[in-house]
Amino acid sequence: MTILLLFAALQIKHLVADFFLQNSKMIMGREKYWHVGRAQHAGIHVLMTAVIFALFGTDLTLILWIVLAEFVVHFHIDWAKARYSTSRALTPDQPMYWYAMGTDQALHQLTYIAMVWAWLSFS
């Protein structure tokens, strides 16, 4: 039951951080590698993840490793999607835009599986 609750918390966190807390500064220009807005966006994700894992009684050292990995992975997934979408001038009316969006979201979800695996393995 605890594992399901942890996954549910990470899903809700992802919804809030990716869709409700992202602003235009975080989205515009993110195809450039060094993008402050994308770093801020990944930072929101890791802060919320740290809170979730703390609520589940996770050791601080493990939380730090998990959020460091999440920051790096989230930053690069979003950069790759933005670079791909921008280089092809994709817009929401094109199927490839949604393929890129779906791939981005699937990769984030796979990241959560890895995070829960780490939590189970090292807690």
Image (cartoon, grey):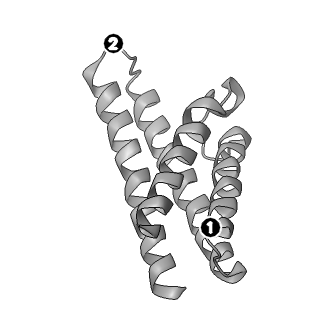
Q: Which quarter of the rendering shows the N terminus?
A: bottom left
- The x, y position of residue 30, in whole percent, is 60, 36
Mark 1 residue crowding within 10 angstroms, few (<14) / some (14–19) / many (20+) = many
Which residue is most to the front?
1
Q: Amino acid at mark 1?
A: Phe
- Based on the displayed image, in which of its 4 quarters is residue 38 positioned? top right
Q: In the rendering, at what x and y percent does residue 80 appear? A: 46, 45
Q: Is residue 8 visible?
A: yes
- Residue 103, quarter of picture: top left
Q: Which residue is mark 2?
A: 93
Report the residue at 45% width, 85% height from top.
121
Question: Looking at the image, is 60 positioned above or below residue 81?
Answer: below
Q: Secondary structure at mark 2?
A: loop
As measured in the structure, the alpha-carbon distance from the residue carrying label 1 to the one carrying label 2 is 38 Å
107 relative to 123 in the view: left or right:
left
Point out the image quarter for the C terminus.
Answer: bottom right
The secondary element bearing badge 1 is classed as: helix
Which residue corresponds to the image point at 48% horizontal and 69% vertical from the top-left?
115
Q: Residue at x 61, y 30 (%)?
A: 20
Report the amino acid beneath label 2.
Asp
Residue that mark 1 sits on: 53
